[in-house]
Amino acid sequence: MSLQTLPLPPSELGESPFWHPTEKSLYWCDIQGQAVHAWHPESGRHRQWRMPSEPGCCAPAADGRLVIGLRNGFYLLDTAKDSADPTALTCLALLPADLHDTAVLRLNDGRCDTTGRFWAGSVITPRTAPNAALWCLQTDPTSATGYRVRHMAGDNFTANGLAFSPDNRTLYWSNTPEHRIDQFDFDVATGEITNRRPWVQFDRKVEGQPYGGRPDGAAVDVEGNYWVAMYEGACVLQLSPAGEVLQRITVPVQCPTMVCFGGEDLQTLFITSARAGRPVEEQEAAVPAGSLFSVRVETAGLPVNLFTY
């Protein structure tokens, strides 16, 4: 197993990578850099689209566009257009103002389920109260845009690690500052989630003690294992469905942020990382903070789900 540093500029806060199955490209968000990126490995072509606010997450849409979670709601991006084109970005639905104060909250980690619904969690800054939430974008014929957002869960500070089990019966969701990953029972037919319970609890940081990091973005493989980037832990963990550590992949940066599976066989694990807020020595290292990585793995991942709902 050999980790590769991709020939791409570092991201301030790389997140939400996905492998586009028809374009054969890696997409990801740079949240702090306020841009969405795409890289085609075969040609080396690198594109980016500037966003009006922080893009917390993105996913491919069935019509060839991207669905994106910005600070205040959900949008569609036409990647055939330049981001300077005012028609490139279309608003689908804004988050309800009474439940989402954009001065302190923004959308963060998200992805689609197998029916094409788009889910996204939020993050609160500063972390004064657990007011971050989980939202789901749904159709609504009474809305001017045809969509609305539904509040699905709360009691979080920084929502991350959203993923679904291969059998569509479990939804994973982590609370990064609390060092905890939760599970919900998931009904894919209705989109309902119930029975929230702690799944894996990691040790908190203790001064003078080794620190393994806290759970950030994640992805699931075909065997139901959960691969999670450990922020400040300089590693990615492969966890079994029972929550046992099966594998630890060390990365040369302190803050990996999220993973996805890609390549023709979905056996290349791509890893994003963070640069913003890191010490100068990490930003100026031979492998700088914010770099993107790839590594071949033995178990294939689940393919990305398209936004079709």
Image (cartoon, rainbow, N blue to C red):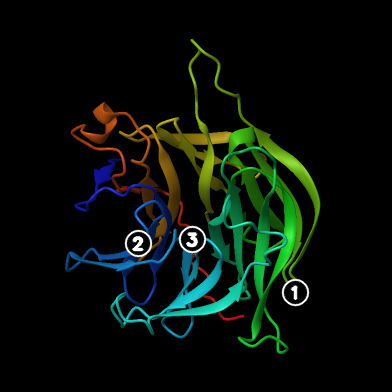
Task: Classify mark 3: residues with Cα within 10 Å, few (<14), some (14-19) or many (20+).
Answer: many
In the rendered structure, the answer to whether residue 90 lies left or right of residue 6 reads right
Q: Which residue is mark 2?
A: 35
Q: Which residue is mark 1?
A: 189
Determine the CA span between mark 1 and mark 2.
33 Å
Q: Nearer the viewer, mark 2 or mark 3?
A: 2
Q: In the image, what residue occupies the spot 28% across and 45% down?
A: 291
Q: Nearer the viewer, mark 1 or mark 2?
A: 2
- Location of the N terminus by quadrant is top left
Where is 16 relative to 21, above or below?
above
Nearest to N terminus: mark 1 or mark 2: 2
Q: Are marks 3 and 1 in contact (CB under 8 Å)?
A: no
Determine the CA span between mark 2 and mark 3.
11 Å
Residue 24 visible, this angle: yes
Q: Position of residue 216 (x, y in %)?
A: 52, 43
Task: Classify mark 1: residues with Cα within 10 Å, few (<14), some (14-19) or many (20+).
Answer: few
Q: Which residue is mark 3?
A: 57
Q: Position of residue 34 (x, y in %)?
A: 37, 59
Q: In the image, what residue occupies the spot 74% across and 39% down?
A: 198
In the rendered structure, the answer to whether residue 168 lies left or right of residue 104 reads right
Q: In the image, what residue occupies the spot 50% across and 30% down?
A: 213
Q: Please state which amino acid type lies under the numbered disc 2.
A: Ala
